[in-house]
Amino acid sequence: MFKALVQKNEFLSLAGNVLFAGFGFLSFLLLARTLSQNIFGQWMLFVSMSSFIEMFRFGLTRTAMVRFLSGANLEERKKLIGSNWVISASVTIVLALLIFLINLFAYKTIQASGFGLFFTWYPIASLATLPLNNALTLLQADLKFGKILFIRILNMAPWVIFLILNLFFFKLEVQYVIITFIFASLISSLTATVLGWNGLSNFFNFDKYNLNRIIQFGKYSVGTLIGSNVLKSADTFIIGLSPILGPEGVAMYSIPLKLTELMDIPLRSLAATVFPKMSKAYIQEQKEQVLSLFYKYTSLLTMLLIPFAIINLIFAEYIVIIIGGEAYLESANIYRLFCIYGLILPLDRFTGIGLDAINQPKYNMYKVAFMVSANIIGDIIAVFVFNSLFLVALTTIAMTIVGILMGNFYFRKTIPFHYRTLATVGFQHIKTILKKKI
């Protein structure tokens, strides 16, 4: 039974997400204790901006590739992979060149801000990670989650080992941290290329039909992906622009924000499983099954997160001190707000999945776009009028609730549901699971 369990794609997907998040959390903790608040804030700006650009680079092609490759024959597969390489490489080179030129012509201004690390190092990092990211796309399409797990370990483990050594022995500056990060990514990219996992040998098999096919599909999914990433990084970006809060404010805000990402691990893993089930049910005109899956997973995950949220609300100060040290104690109340925010994430996430599953991705994009716009306006007021990180977090919660209501309005047009049912389905499902275990 254990062997069968660990070979399941669901388990390997969850294991990969947990491992990747674990490495990310450990590196976050090590850097928070290695770097000064100012430099750590600049690092977080580098990470936030890089994540945003990565979302655009590969959001344009990844979802489309996973979908199209699943039903492609060998010849179609070669053309799709070649077309994917042309698009992703072209976008990467253009963006890297643009960022390099901006840094070249506005060097003093950029270096004086908190964005110096990003404009200096991202063009190199983007080229180093290109083959690796293309490999992750193909492996996901082929359901090779074991290989994804391997390549992620190869990518993150050497860098985390360096961070541990750097904390206790080397004491090197942030530039060497980034260089090591790029070097680890380059090793992973070369490994994926040598093993043939990224399909680089098919580069010249691209054709106009598949280029257009990927772009036409990707322009919708990338809108939602970029919007979601902007929603996550807008707070950090706007805080970084503040002359009063600045990089120190970014560092203070990043501790509770990073802790909250722990709640997103089971969400991401479960969403990868639920989405195809809901899509298949809707295609087969089984709306009752779509509704059942929506009720089941939204309510169940919310119920499971409640104990986690309560514990973190009570011990917020201790958790923040353990992760960042006493210098970040002021962020404990912000973390409490994010614990509440975590409880509404399942409803937000599965509403978006539901809209995509019932073939209404444009409404999902509208929902995210509205949330982004409202959140940015709220952040600007919170940062530049009140200079308050607490209000920034409160704005995030308020806009998420409004986004949920908006998304549910569209979803209920096709799949009517009732909020009160969510409160009972999860509880009943947990009782069923406990009875089976007993």
Image (cartoon, helix red, strand yellow):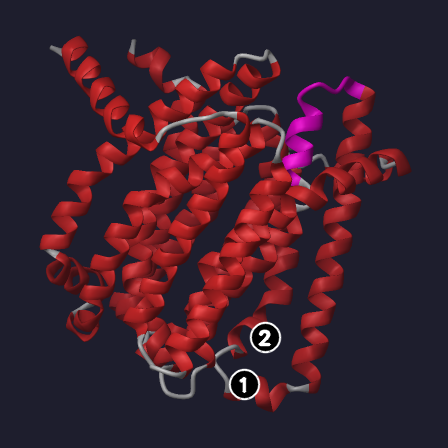
Residue kind at label 2, given as amino acid type: Thr
Residue 239's disc number? none
The image shows residue 351, relative to residue 367, as above or below, that is above
Q: Nearer the viewer, residue 341 or 423?
A: 423
User: Viewed as shown, does residue 53 lie left or right of 150?
Assistant: right
Residue type at mark 1?
Gln
Quadrant, the N terminus:
top left
Secondary structure, mark 1, is: helix
* Residue 55: image location, x then y, percent: 59, 52
Q: Residue furthest right?
A: 208
The residue at the point 25 percent across, 66 percent down is: 168
In the picture, measured across the screen, residue 13 lies left or right of residue 388, that is right
Q: Which residue is mark 1?
A: 111
- Tell me if 361 is positioned left or right of 51 in this view: right
User: Which quadrant, please, contains the C terminus?
Assistant: top left
Badge 2 density bin: few <14, some 14–19, many ≥20, Cα 10 Å: many
State the residue at coordinates (53%, 12%).
Answer: 286
Query: Where residue 206 appears, x then y in whole percent?
Result: 85, 37
Across and down, in percent, residue 71 comes to: 71, 18
Residue 122, located in which quarter of the rendered image? bottom right
Q: What's the magenta region?
A: 62-74
**Circle 2 sits on which residue?**
120
